[in-house]
Image: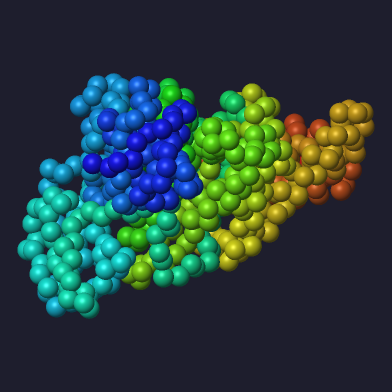
């Protein structure tokens, strides 16, 4: 038993007096209840520990137990479909042991030790293996094959293999002898420190978009696979709803959803929805390729800080298998508030709005772990990070939003007025931006259409022009505008309502393939150019509005099914017929 004794307790912060044998960032067990903690500060006369569980009832004089290892998570089959708390404790298993509330010091393995997996070996005796190589496979769910990886610090010759068959996560699958002759027993599971990024062979440029089926994202503000995006918005603007849509429809192989400090009822909704939704890509339950990390606002605040790192470590693990992963962090503001609370208890010097001075570096550490990579085993994989930010009062000048902008290249600014007007996704096209367009231009040209980027730029130019015209309209009204400017306002309305606004409850509009997105954009711009011919001949714009074509274009997202792109040609003929009638 360790001689380290608790001296002081301040919420989740525990101090041990005098010199100790503990190391910085070491995982420890605190008190007789063996609460999970992490060493975050060491001086000559005291050691500071951050406890990831409720410290009520803890007393000075209780022991602190050393583990000799950093804060780690277990990686192995059984992660997918599971629901964990911020330090990777399985909540379903905990419920079966301790009921509706998490008992103090409860120790439940992250992945089942009893379940047997059908293992297929990928190596044989005599093979040379190195860190990151795939040595076995097993079907983790109906849609995802789990690839067991050689730990990164092990390399050598395979000296023994088991035959293909059923094994638990603790059974030895192969034995590897390294250059010093030491034999390592490799199982289906391994441990990894959550604050250390997993190594890769090479960082590759992000040149493919994460296709989400949401028009304002895919067409106007795309994010690359391996990119990082921020969704800032005040209360009720639809951050969680937008992330739900992305989790359901984006073309990532694995979804990691981190509910960080969110309300319990929101996480309940996520659990319920994801359990019932059929994955459109596979026809199987969406949960088959999803991991949920639920760290609600009533859970210990220190575990909220760890939940982000737990999520990104799981994402990197599946990336190393050659999968494309997407991590939804909802919300990084609650994570920053946990940093602020712990920093206050440590009596550190506060910076802007009380946040610690190291907030920017912690945010950068998190977002830098995104990317498109060549893995150690030669496969390619990516981690895309989408972080929601909850600025108080929708004030985007606050520290978390401003620092997040520094480390992300995609910014989807949610607007309260759009949300209250039932315009979803409530992404404000004037305040949002994506810096990935240049990287993705070649992909759009080769896989969608050579005119895609040109048409997208024209679409955005019309919206920008409408924005400046609306300032004039507010002052003197729309009646005094010339017809060419009235046309801009009418076409911009079609773009806003017919293209940017999307209905998550409509079978054809909840997910729109890129081909249909392009054709919708193309037909709107074609109609705009034909209308310009009318205006150039000084024919009143009222004749155009009388044709009903503006409303028809607004409704085409519902009227033209996703699998019937040929109907756009019929719409184009109808536009030509009505415009030619006016011109005659």
Residue closest to the eye, 355 or 508: 355
**How far across and down, in percent of the image, does residue 320 sit?**
35, 60
Asked if residue 221 lies left or right of residue 62, the reply is: right
**Above or below 155: residue 502:** above
Q: Residue at x 67, y 55 (%)?
A: 455
Whether residue 448 is visible, yes or no, is: yes
Quadrant of the image containing the C terminus: top right
Residue closest to the eye, 279 or 264: 264
Q: Which residue is drawn at 60% across and 26% down?
A: 235
**How far across and down, in percent of the image, does residue 249 sit?**
44, 43
**How far across and down, in percent of the image, does residue 425 sit?**
58, 35
Is the image coloured rainbow, by chain, by secondary structure, or in one colour? rainbow
Residue closest to the eye, 184 or 116: 184
Asked if residue 541 lies left or right of residue 189, the reply is: right
**Above or below 90: residue 381:** below
Whether residue 523 is visible, yes or no, is: no
**How far across and down, in percent of the image, does residue 318 sit?**
34, 55
Residue closest to the eye, 9 or 461: 9
Q: Residue at x 27, y 30 (%)?
A: 32
């Amino acid at each position: 038993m360790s001689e380290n004794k608790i001296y002081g307790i301040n919420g989740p912060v525990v101090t041990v007096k005098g010199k100790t044998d503990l190391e910085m960032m070491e995982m420890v067990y605190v008190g007789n209840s063996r609460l999970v903690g992490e060493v975050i500060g060491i001086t000559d006369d005291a050691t500071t520990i951050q406890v990831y569980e409720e410290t009520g009832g803890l007393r000075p004089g209780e022991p602190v137990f050393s583990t000799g290892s950093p804060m780690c998570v277990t990686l192995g089959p059984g992660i997918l479909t599971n629901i964990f708390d911020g330090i990777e404790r399985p909540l379903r298993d905990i419920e079966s042991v301790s009921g509706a509330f998490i008992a103090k010091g409860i120790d439940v393995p992250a992945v089942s030790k009893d379940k047997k997996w059908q293992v297929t070996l990928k190596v044989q005796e005599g093979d040379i293996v190195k860190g990151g190589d795939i040595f076995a496979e097993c079907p983790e769910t109906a849609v995802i094959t789990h690839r067991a990886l050689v730990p990164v610090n092990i390399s050598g010759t395979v000296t023994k293999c088991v035959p293909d068959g059923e094994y638990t996560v603790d059974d030895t699958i192969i034995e590897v002898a390294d250059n010093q002759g030491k034999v390592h027993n490799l199982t289906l599971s391994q441990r990894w420190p959550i604050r250390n990024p997993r190594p890769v062979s090479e960082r590759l440029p992000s040149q493919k978009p994460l296709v989400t089926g949401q028009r304002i994202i895919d067409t106007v503000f795309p994010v690359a696979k391996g990119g990082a995006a921020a969704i800032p918005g005040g209360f009720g603007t639809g951050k969680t709803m937008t992330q739900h849509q992305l989790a359901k429809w984006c073309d990532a192989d694995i979804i990691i959803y981190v509910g960080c400090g969110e309300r319990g009822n929101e996480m309940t909704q996520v659990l319920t929805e994801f359990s019932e939704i059929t994955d459109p890509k596979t026809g199987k339950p969406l949960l088959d390729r999803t991991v949920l990390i639920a760290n609600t606002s009533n859970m210990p605040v220190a575990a909220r800080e760890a939940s982000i790192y737990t999520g990104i470590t799981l994402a990197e693990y599946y990336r190393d298998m050659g999968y494309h992963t997407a991590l939804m962090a909802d919300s990084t503001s609650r994570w920053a508030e946990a940093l602020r609370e712990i920093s206050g208890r440590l009596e550190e010097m506060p910076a802007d709005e009380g946040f610690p001075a190291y907030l920017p570096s912690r945010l950068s550490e998190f977002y830098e772990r995104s990317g498109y990579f060549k893995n150690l085993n030669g496969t390619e994989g990516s981690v895309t990070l989408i972080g929601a930010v909850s600025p108080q009062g929708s004030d985007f000048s606050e520290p978390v939003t401003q620092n997040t902008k520094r480390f992300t290249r995609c910014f989807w600014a949610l607007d309260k007025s759009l949300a209250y007007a039932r315009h979803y996704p409530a992404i404000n096209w004037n305040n949002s931006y994506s810096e990935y367009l240049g990287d993705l231009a070649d992909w759009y040209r080769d896989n969608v259409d050579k005119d895609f980027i040109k048409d997208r730029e024209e679409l955005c130019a019309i919206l920008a022009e409408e924005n400046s015209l609306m300032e004039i309209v507010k002052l003197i009204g729309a009646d005094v505008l010339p017809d060419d400017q009235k046309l801009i306002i009418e076409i911009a309305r079609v773009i806003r309502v017919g293209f940017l606004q999307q209905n998550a409850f409509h079978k054809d509009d909840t997910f729109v393939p890129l081909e249909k997105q392009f054709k919708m954009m193309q037909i709107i711009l074609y109609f705009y150019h034909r209308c310009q011919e009318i205006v150039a001949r000084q024919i009143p714009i009222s004749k155009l509005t009388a044709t009903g074509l503006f409303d028809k274009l607004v409704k085409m997202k519902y009227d033209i099914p996703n699998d019937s792109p040929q109907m756009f040609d019929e719409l184009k003929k109808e536009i030509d017929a009505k415009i030619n009638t006016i011109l005659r």
